[in-house]
Amino acid sequence: MTLRMNPAALSLALVITALAGAICASSPAWAGVGSTKHNLGYLSPAEVKTTATSEICIFCHTPHNSRPATPLWNKADTGTTFEPYASQTLAATLSPKPALGQPTGASKLCLTCHDGTIALGTLLNIPGQDKVMGGTLPVTGPASRITGGKITGGPSYIGANLKDDHPISFDYSAAYTSNPEMKSTPFTPAEVRLDNSGRLECTSCHDPHGTGYPKFLVASMENGALCEACHDKLNWQGSSHTTSLATWNGSGANPFNEDMGSPGFTNDTPAIQSCLACHRSHGGAVGKTLLKDNGEEDVCLACHNGNAASKNVDASFDYTYKHDVKNMLWAGRHTPSRSSAAEPAREDSASLNLINRHVECADCHNGHGARSGNHSMGTVNGNTIGGNLVGGWGAKPVWFAPGNAALTYTVADFNTTLPGSDNLEGYVCVKCHSYYAYGTTPPSVPSGNANGDPVKESDVTADFNVFNPSFHPVFAQGQNQPPTGANPNWPANGLGLTNTFNYGYYDETGAQWETGTSLTTAPTGLWSVRHNSTIACSDCHGAADMTDQMDPKPNGVHGSSERWILRNEESNRGYVPAVTKKNFCYNCHRRDVYGDEDYTPPKANYSRVSHPVDGLAANVSPFYKRGANTGNDGNNFGILCLTCHGGAYLNRENDGVTPRVNDVMQGVHGADAGTCGCRNNNQCAPSRCPVPPGVDSTPIGAAPLGNRMMNGACVEFHVPATTAAGLQLYFRQITVGADKVCNGNFADIVTGNTANYNY
């Protein structure tokens, strides 16, 4: 079909073309609009076009009868009310700034087509008429994208709901003036510009007349170039996602929704994908900072499932005991916010309470800042975060008295792995497992109590309280640091108390290393725990088997086949005979010093009090026998050490009489237990504890159980040994099979071993 144009119409078309050229002269690519999808004339190379005219500019511009908006807009205002983007982290809308309003300027003009409310060919002034008049030119295209001449599908359809689209039509200066994660103008690349009012609009990222980049973008998206014109995410530069060269192996779902490299997705990397590996500018998850999927775990596991990233985290969440990030109950609960534009986005304690309790990858890790590497296990700074937690944050407790949970906290942002920067790994765990999140109403332990019964969590800030007489050194170095030469049985190798820890004692073949004086000769690849070491929560909690702690599976508190997400003994290096039922504590403490079932320790005198403590090694101590209610089976935890150290079950308040509001499970985190075990456990023998208060039958010389972390599953009283007097241990008498934590009735020890040194 040939369309004829009268001289007046031809003159009109020439004027329109000239005006469009003047309007867009600042764009070097404007003349190329004819080869883009914005050419709706019948000569267009695109699928969506009209059969009525070959003109191009007329679908947007007209010199007469235009809408009173720059630049001579040829479409009516549809009156659409849009749902703008909303976020608790958008600095431009933080109080007292208003929330985002309706689209303005160029954005409102773009949306006259892309909101799908009017037909593409509906114009205020259609070509080929003798007089100025409106009308509709027929525009057709694939049914999946065009219905009745309107955009109704495909990537071009934005709709009236802008909640899942990058925010537009806001004063950019309000966003960056006090926000360290936003850059000031002028931008680099210079093609990214604000409008004449200093507002960010669609045209800040897109040039509707065409560019050399896909989707009318004004700059390349590769390596985050376009996004980084405005965004300067904390710790982003040098993070794993900016440097990773991992590629998709072609298995499973494609983790990359945009092809940013050479044709084909399999040569893309997270470094090339950059922001688009996780986010979408349009069509992102609502209320989830435009993530490409509905939840943080969906985004992370799209790559970390063995098909792209080097670390396969997905498999770790299939264990019975785990931080269950795949649980759909958590959907939408992770809600970071900013209290001010100058602060990073975080969740406040109200977002972590019991009603909103959840666990997502982003609760521990920050995808913008995370780097490879875990903390340095066993060193004096072994409680400091590793690179994998950079960019995250934690709650730093403020302790005020032994045995008490912290009631006040300060926020600790993790911007470095250097020690001494308020960046202890334990601060991450405190966010959820303390008063900070749940106040005085603790949640239930998902794994249950030692016997499987329901039980509440203990507050880790009470357990690890640095004023306690004993605690595992998660937040500070431990209390038990005698001089190097305190024990005359220790070899003179300068290791001090390390002689009871697994510091370079065994290598992979079991060869001993005790005689050297230089630590540089120690074997590598072992836990290097010393008496002045500090540890992190993930040293005890994590994958159960050593094979699960190595590539491609990540080290960390993701999941375990053991209850309470416990790690098991890493291996049986040098242990003969092999451990029959793995004793968790031997990850750090030496089995040949403390012993195990069917195994009397050959170096028992390395500890302060030789184990077995009852001195019955020749006749086989009941602690080291194999069988029901003995050895590792002596308590419901299945860990021999917890018979005496840690593992109590709290059911009574400190007066030994008043029932606690919540039964609380005690691990081996730390202790501030009093002299009598029944003050913390209502299953003690009444004759041995003050019932009622004031009637005391405590053995002479009994010390607070917390002094040596003797608040074990079965212990009732502890009279410490000295070099001149033997140890005394008194055990709770229980109903076997009915007790919460202890499985057997051990005979009291009244003439145990003397101490090898005093403390």
Image: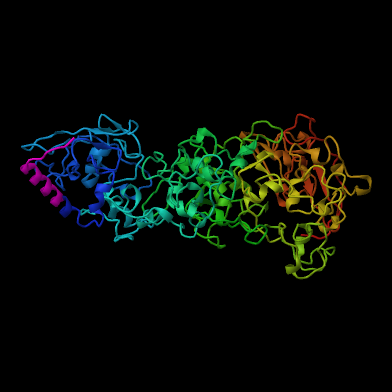
Residue 88 placement (x, y as % from top left): 37, 44
Depth check, front residue: 7 or 691: 7
Quadrant location of the N terminus? top left
Residue under the image location 7 percent in, 38 percent down: 132
Residue under the image location 39 percent in, 53 percent down: 221
Q: Can residue 170 be seen?
A: no
Depth check, front residue: 335 or 29: 29
The span picked out in magenta is 1-19
Q: Tell me: 5 left or right of 97.
A: left
Residue 234 placement (x, y as % from top left): 44, 56
Please state the total of marks drawn on the protein image.
Answer: 0
Depth check, front residue: 43 or 628: 43
Residue extending furthest toward the front: 1
Q: Tell me: 534 left or right of 734.
A: left
Quadrant location of the C terminus? bottom right
Q: Tell me: 337 left or right of 502.
A: left
Which of the 4 image quarters holds residue 475?
bottom right
